[in-house]
C-alpha cells in the first residue's frame, strides 16, 4: 500500500467539510509527472520494494527440505509497469517441482501445487504450465462462474 501510494492521487478534505454531502478533493501530488504517465515511477517503486524483500532461493530450498513444508511468499505482477515477477516465479516453480518429482522415486513423495488468488486469471502461459506439468495442481480463484478444475496426478 505504501509503495502504490507513492504514485497515487491523495484525497484532501473538502473546502467545506461541514456542508452536507461534502466530498474529498482528489489531488495529484507530482506536478512534474502527468498522472497518465506514471509507468517509470511505478516500476522504480515496485522494483525497489522487490529488492528490499528479496527472498533467497537457498532459503526456499531449505524450507522445502523440511517434512510437510509449506512456503508462502508474495509476488508482484504489474505488466503495465513491465514487472512480471509472478510469471517468472510460476515458471520456475513448475520447473523445479517437475524436476524434483522426476528425481525422487520414493512413493511417499507426492508434491501438490495449490494456487490461490482473489484475482488470479489463467493466461495462456499459466494454462500451458499447468497442462505440461507432471505435478498435481489445485487452483482456487474468485470468479462469478465457479467450476471445479482438477489436474490429475497421473497423465
Image (cartoon, rainbow, N blue to C red):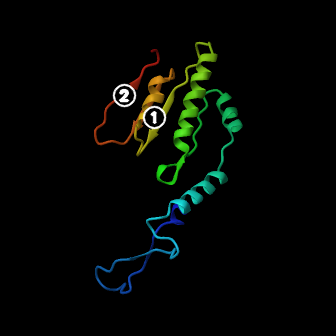
From the viewer's perspective, is residue 34 above or below residue 103? below
Front residue of 146/96: it is 96
Residue at position x 45%, y 34% from top? 126
Residue at position x 69%, y 41% from top? 56
On the rendered structure, is 130 left or right of 109?
Answer: left
Q: Secondary structure at mark 1?
A: helix
Front residue of 145/134: it is 134
Q: Which residue is mark 1?
A: 125
Image coordinates for residue 111, horizontal then vertical, percent? 55, 24
Residue at position x 51%, y 71% from top? 33
> Residue 96, located in which quarter of the rendered image?
top right
> Which mark's residue is nearer the viewer, 1 or 2?
1
* Mark linked to residue 145: none
Image coordinates for residue 3, horizontal then vertical, percent? 55, 61
Classify mark 2: residues with Cα within 10 Å, few (<14), some (14-19) or many (20+): few
What is the spatial separation of the Cα atoms under label 1 and label 2, in whole angstroms? Answer: 17 Å
Image coordinates for residue 42, horizontal then vertical, percent? 53, 60
Q: Can residue 76 be seen from the camera position used here?
A: no
Pick the quarter of the image with the C terminus.
top left
Front residue of 4/138: it is 4
Residue at position x 70%, y 33% from top? 62
Q: Which residue is mark 2?
A: 149
Image coordinates for residue 21, horizontal then vertical, percent? 29, 79
From the viewer's perspective, is residue 28 above or below residue 148? below
On the rendered structure, is 91 left or right of 65?
Answer: left
Q: Earlier in the sequence, mark 1 or mark 2?
A: 1
Q: Can residue 94 be seen from the camera position used here?
A: yes
Q: Secondary structure at mark 2?
A: loop
On the rendered structure, is 128 left or right of 65?
Answer: left
Amino acid at each position: 500500500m505504501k509503495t502504490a501510494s507513492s504514485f497515487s492521487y491523495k484525497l484532501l478534505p473538502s473546502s467545506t467539510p461541514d456542508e452536507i454531502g461534502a466530498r474529498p478533493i482528489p489531488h495529484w501530488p507530482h506536478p512534474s509527472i502527468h498522472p497518465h504517465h506514471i509507468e517509470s515511477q511505478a516500476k522504480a517503486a515496485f522494483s525497489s520494494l522487490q529488492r528490499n524483500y528479496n527472498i533467497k532461493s537457498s532459503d526456499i530450498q531449505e524450507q522445502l527440505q523440511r517434512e510437510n513444508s509449506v512456503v508462502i511468499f508474495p509476488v508482484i505482477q504489474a505488466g503495465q509497469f513491465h514487472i512480471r515477477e509472478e510469471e517468472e516465479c510460476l515458471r520456475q516453480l513448475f520447473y523445479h517441482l517437475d524436476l524434483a518429482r522426476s528425481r525422487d522415486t520414493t512413493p511417499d513423495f507426492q508434491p501438490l501445487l495449490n494456487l490461490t488468488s482473489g484475482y488470479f486469471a489463467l493466461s495462456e502461459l499459466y494454462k500451458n504450465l499447468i497442462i505440461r506439468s507432471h505435478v498435481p495442481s489445485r487452483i482456487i480463484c474468485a470468479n462469478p462462474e465457479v467450476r471445479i478444475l482438477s489436474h490429475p496426478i497421473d497423465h
